[in-house]
Amino acid sequence: MSASKPTPPNPADRVRSSELPVAWIMMLGLMVAIGPLSIDMYLPALPAMAESFDVPTAFIANSVPAYFLGLVFGQLFYGPFSDRVGRVKPLYIGMSLYVVASLVCATTNNEYILFVGRTVQALGACVGAVVTRAAIRDRLSARQTAKAFSIMILVMGLAPILAPLLGAQFLEFFSWHSIFWFLTGFGVLNLLLTKFFFKETLAPENRNVRPAKEVLSQYWDLLKDPTFNYPAIGGGLLMGAMFVYISAASELLMDGYGISAQQFSWVFGVNAAGFIALTQLNQWLTNRFRILSLLRFGAMVQVVASAGLLVLGVVFGSGAWLPLVLVCIFFCIAGLGLTQPNASAIALAFQKRRAGMASALQGSLMFSVGIFGGLLLNLFAVNPVLKLGITMFALMGLGCLLVWRIDKNLNLDDAE
């Protein structure tokens, strides 16, 4: 009787060695970059778009929360879908939808069609964030996941640095429509990356086979799971506050302080650089400190910075010295470099068969906070600095409180 052939290694097996698949992680970062590119690249164009549509800048800025709305509901769909069918098919569907919606935004001259196009654009773009986080969880351990998210942010983090600069350059030579033509091309690039370089990471035996009608109950089970809810909701509040800043930035800095589109893009670039720098420092720190300790420290940095912004708004109002306002905003954003990789790693650590759902719910929570915070901004009839300070401090303070509720004895090495 002939000897049985050895079983070939499964490409979906999780990496347990100390060596990370850096090239693969960087490719995932490029795929996720479609999100920040889509959000940040057109921000310098908001005043020009408002003039084109003959509406106030604050009105056309509603296209930002319209985009967040698509991110919330799109992720909730792709999460369970990717747990059931694998990671590749959702990428094809989402990126194709993104390309079509970007074409609509590029060719419209109606502000309401733009809002719809932005929402649909987000419904497509969010697949990248869901699938890549889940794919990393498929392959890597919890500590490796925290490092992988830091590497991925290094790539995707270039988007918020370059996107406003690139958008401002497009405005120098072309109309705002050209920005959406560029985004259409980036969507096509993501389809090509999926086709030629993204391999399935979710083995058939690890797929979620529970009936689709139980999706809502599975999401509810996730929200009740203390290994998920505190890091996911806490991290979502901390990250969501950044999206509040994105919604308010054009009105605050360009209309309020009168800075140019080029200067605005540099402000965004510096903030993003701080975010990236701390994510890379986080890679080194995870070898020396507990992930939970780093998460808590980063949350405290964000709370202190948002409190500073609040004080400036109370004491000086619209006359607050711009450099001090920018310093506070910088640390609010840079602190995400410690909170986001580590909150994501903890939230996903114990979610083996529902990593896609966990990734989706985590992402949806972030953008739900962004939508809620954007609405909250409009409730305060106060100066723009105070308005942003109140909103960011409230969200970051609550997020920090939840982060400190995470069980300090949680052992991530026990995660499968």
Image: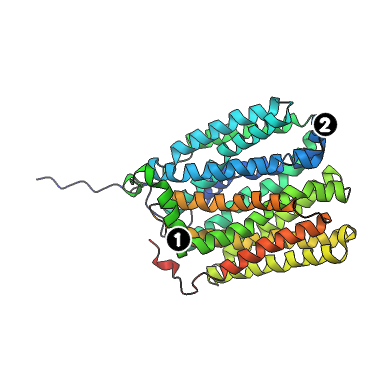
62 or 415: which is nearer to us? Answer: 62
- Residue under numbered circle 1: 224
226 or 355: which is nearer to us? Answer: 226
Q: Secondary structure at mark 1?
A: helix
* Amino acid found under the numbered disc labelled 1: Lys
Residue at point 83%, 44% (across, down):
262
Q: CA distance from mark 2 to mark 1?
A: 47 Å
Q: Secondary structure at mark 2?
A: loop
| Quadrant location, the N terminus | top left
* Residue density around tag 1, few if under 14, some if 14–19, many if 20 or more, within 10 Å: few
Q: Position of residue 139 (x, y in %)?
A: 42, 53
Residue 116 seen anywhere in this rendered image of the structure: yes
Image position of 126 with respect to 320: above or below: above
- Residue under numbered circle 2: 54
Q: Is residue 405 left or right of residue 255?
A: left
* Amino acid found under the numbered disc labelled 2: Asp
The way the protein has been coloured in the rendering is rainbow
Q: Position of residue 241 (x, y in %)?
A: 67, 56
Q: Is residue 163 left or right of residue 83?
A: right
Image position of 235 with respect to 177: above or below: below
Image quadrant where residue 58 sits:
top right
Q: Is residue 370 left or right of residue 55?
A: left
